[in-house]
Amino acid sequence: MTIFSKVILLLTFSFIIHTFSFCQSQQDSSKVERELKSVLDEYVQNANRGNFKAMRQMLTDDYYLFQNGRKYTADETIEMISNSKLSDITFSMNNVKSGAGGNIAFLTFDLNWHGKINGNPTDAEAMETYIFRKEGGKWKMQAKSVVMMDKKAH
């Protein structure tokens, strides 16, 4: 086998390994994205049921919500949600992006939200970003940033 043949064989092997690694990474990323979406879905289901204890357990102890220029702790977030008497919540996510490394992951998307606040029908659009941390084998929300969209602006 000539040097040229060895180089070609080595390059081909490297390309195959790189392609396999990329595909595996994409599969892992898709799996994580599904897991994170499932966490959000469960969180909303708990809000609809008024199960605030379960909602709080889905947040890390150092969780923060950044919304409307204000920062809320996990307990303040749950208190705000419980005082708002949220119900009939449905939502859809568009332009979803996600990523993960080790026990940290993120999910960002455009949100269309429908539901009731204090019994009043409400629709909202926002851009949201979540940071998740895996604790005890489960993804928990560590931070959330919400930017409300003015429907007139787009």
Image (spheres, rainbow, N blue to C red):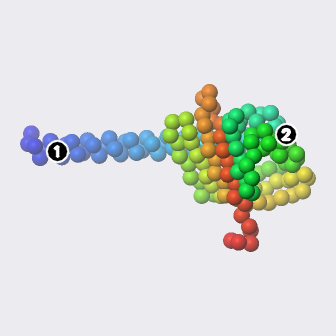
Percent x, y of residue 59 = 70, 37
Q: Which mark is residue 7?
A: 1
- In the current view of this chain or complex, which residue is farthest to the front? 70
* Residue 55 image-quadrant placement: top right
- Secondary structure state at the residue bearing disc 1: helix
Query: Which quadrant, please, contains the N terminus?
Result: top left
- In the current view of this chain or complex, which residue is farthest to the right? 119
Viewer can see residue 106: yes
The reply to whether discs 2 and 1 touch (Cβ–Cβ < 8 Å) is no
Numbered circles on residues, count = 2
* Residue 77 image-quadrant placement: top right
- Secondary structure state at the residue bearing disc 2: loop
At 48% from the left and 42% from the top, the residue drawn is 27
Percent x, y of residue 53 = 80, 33
Q: Nearer the viewer, residue 73 or 28?
A: 73
32 relative to 111, above or below: above
Q: Going by the image, does 87 lie left or right of 35?
A: right
Viewer can see residue 93: no
Query: Which quadrant, please, contains the C terminus?
Result: bottom right
Categorize mark 1 by other alpha carbons within 10 Å: few (<14), some (14-19), many (20+). Answer: few
Q: Nearer the viewer, residue 20 or 102?
A: 102
Indicate which disc, 2 or 1, sits on the residue closer to the N terminus: 1
At 69% from the left and 58% from the top, the residue drawn is 147
- In the current view of this chain or complex, which residue is farthest to the left? 2
Q: CA distance from mark 2 to mark 1?
A: 64 Å
Q: Going by the image, does 27 lie left or right of 109?
A: left
Question: What amino acid does circle 1 point to?
Answer: Val
Question: What amino acid does circle 2 point to?
Answer: Gly
At 71% from the left and 72% from the top, the residue drawn is 153
Which residue was labeled with disc 2? 50
Q: Nearer the viewer, residue 88 or 71?
A: 71
Percent x, y of residue 84 = 87, 49
